[in-house]
Image (tube, helix red, strand yellow):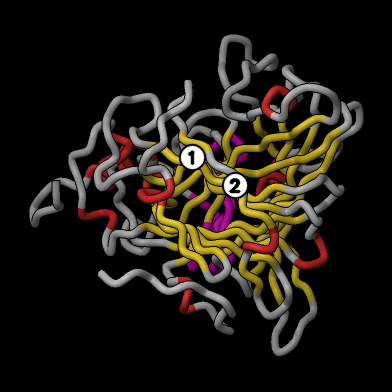
């Protein structure tokens, strides 16, 4: 159903429910928690935000890092996607059997709850409030200094495969649309093959275009004749490094976008959380050239119905998980971005960018 004048925006209604008394400490354009027991949200008021499960924070399941934007009209963080942390151990057995899923596993720290506990690492003896706000520092640079915010996110040990990991989230004032995640194996962990980060909610904005080197993949075509597996996903092969776009610094890049001009125009969807109420955005991953491994690849899967429901996604099959994977190297960086810019509006323009089909 198309949005009509005077219709209630469910997204705005949900914001009022989720952030009734939420307040955030702001330093310039920075968004930082001002209460360690309140909403845990960090980011830029002129770009992206990220958060952890917390009282008054961005809504969603346990075990997932929230990512979104700061709404120019709502003046609140708007959750757009989630990031799951998926360590893969070395050893025998199938790939899936060696993978831990931060959002699905049963917590041992919080018995009876699904999803690993995520929290801000607080070194012994340090001020809890200051640490939770994140480390904000100024880096010397020209033509002007760069502000950088860093938050360490600890993840509960994975009971399924013995993995112990943490993630460093970093943002800079010069790239407000991007979060640089670096991943680390902790002491006592089972040996790791990968630590993958996956954006998990492509069906929310109904992402259907995957932008590769000289190739635009449409989920409706890719999965046209595919059936769902036992978990409701449609799976295909990965796309190797040679299929990824490269920017002028040699970094590997991949975009995922909606095919709709205004994804918020469709309303009254069931389940209620499926109603998208934000602006059209480009979702993307960048792997810096220094961090690229030979097995770097893009992985996506598809969905026909919304998660945990039988409600068909309007307009046809979409991508759901959108991720890049590669062999683990300590501290390797995966950059996730959300921007209102279209892929062809990036500066400098990316070579080998495919063309949109004629409407």
The x, y position of residue 102, in whole percent, is: 63, 29
Residue drawn at (34%, 69%) of the image: 357
Tell me which segment is drawn in magenta: 24-48
State the residue in front, 200 or 221: 221
Q: Is residue 27 magenta?
A: yes
> Which mark identifies residue 299?
2
Q: Quick check: 328 above or below 260?
A: above
Q: Quick check: 70 above or below 312?
A: below
Residue drawn at (31%, 48%) of the image: 276
Callout 1: SS: loop
Image quadrant for the C terminus? Answer: bottom left
- Precedes in sequence: disc 2 or disc 1: 1
Q: Answer left or right for 252 relative to 317.
A: right
Which residue is tagged 1?
57
- Observer able to see residue 234: yes
Front: mark 2 or 1 = 2
The x, y position of residue 293, in whole percent, is: 81, 56
Q: Quick check: 324 above or below 269?
A: below
> Which mark identifies residue 234?
none
The x, y position of residue 86, in whole percent, is: 68, 35
- Observer able to see residue 44: no
Residue drawn at (72%, 18%) of the image: 160
Mark 2 Cα-neighbour bin, 10 Å: few <14, some 14–19, many ≥20: some
């Amino acid at each position: 159903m198309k949005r009509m004048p005077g219709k209630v925006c469910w997204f705005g209604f949900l914001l009022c429910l989720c952030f009734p008394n939420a307040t955030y400490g702001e330093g310039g354009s920075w968004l930082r928690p001002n209460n360690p027991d309140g909403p845990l949200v960090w980011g830029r008021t002129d770009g992206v935000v990220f958060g952890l499960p917390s009282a008054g924070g961005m809504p969603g399941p346990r075990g997932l890092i929230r990512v979104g934007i700061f709404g120019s009209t709502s003046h609140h963080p708007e959750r757009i996607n989630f990031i799951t942390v998926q360590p893969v151990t070395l050893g025998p057995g199938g790939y899936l059997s060696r993978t831990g899923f931060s959002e699905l596993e049963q917590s041992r720290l919080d018995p009876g709850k699904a999803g690993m506990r995520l929290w801000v690492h607080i070194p012994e003896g340090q001020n809890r409030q200051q640490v939770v706000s994140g480390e904000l520092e100024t880096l010397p640079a020209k033509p002007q200094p760069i502000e950088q915010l860093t938050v360490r996110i600890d993840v509960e040990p994975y009971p399924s495969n013995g993995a112990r990991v943490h993630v460093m989230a970093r943002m800079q004032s010069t790239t407000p649309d991007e979060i640089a995640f670096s991943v680390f194996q902790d002491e006592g962990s089972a040996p790791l093959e990968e630590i993958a980060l996956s954006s998990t909610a492509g069906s929310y904005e109904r992402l259907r275009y995957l932008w590769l080197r000289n190739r635009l993949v449409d989920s409706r075509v890719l999965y046209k004749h595919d059936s769902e597996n036992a978990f409701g996903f449609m799976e295909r092969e990965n796309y190797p490094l040679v299929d990824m776009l490269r920017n002028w610094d040699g970094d590997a890049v991949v975009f995922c976008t909606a095919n709709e001009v205004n994804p918020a125009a469709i309303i009254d969807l069931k389940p209620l959380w499926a109603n998208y109420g934000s602006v059209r955005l480009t979702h993307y991953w960048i792997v810096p050239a220094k961090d690229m491994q030979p097995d770097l690849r893009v992985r996506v899967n598809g969905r026909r119905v919304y998660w945990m429901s039988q409600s068909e996604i309007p307009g046809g099959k979409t991508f759901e998980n959108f991720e890049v994977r590669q062999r683990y190297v300590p501290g390797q960086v995966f950059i996730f971005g959300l921007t209102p810019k279209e892929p062809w509006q990036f500066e400098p323009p990316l070579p080998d960018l495919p063309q949109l089909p004629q409407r």
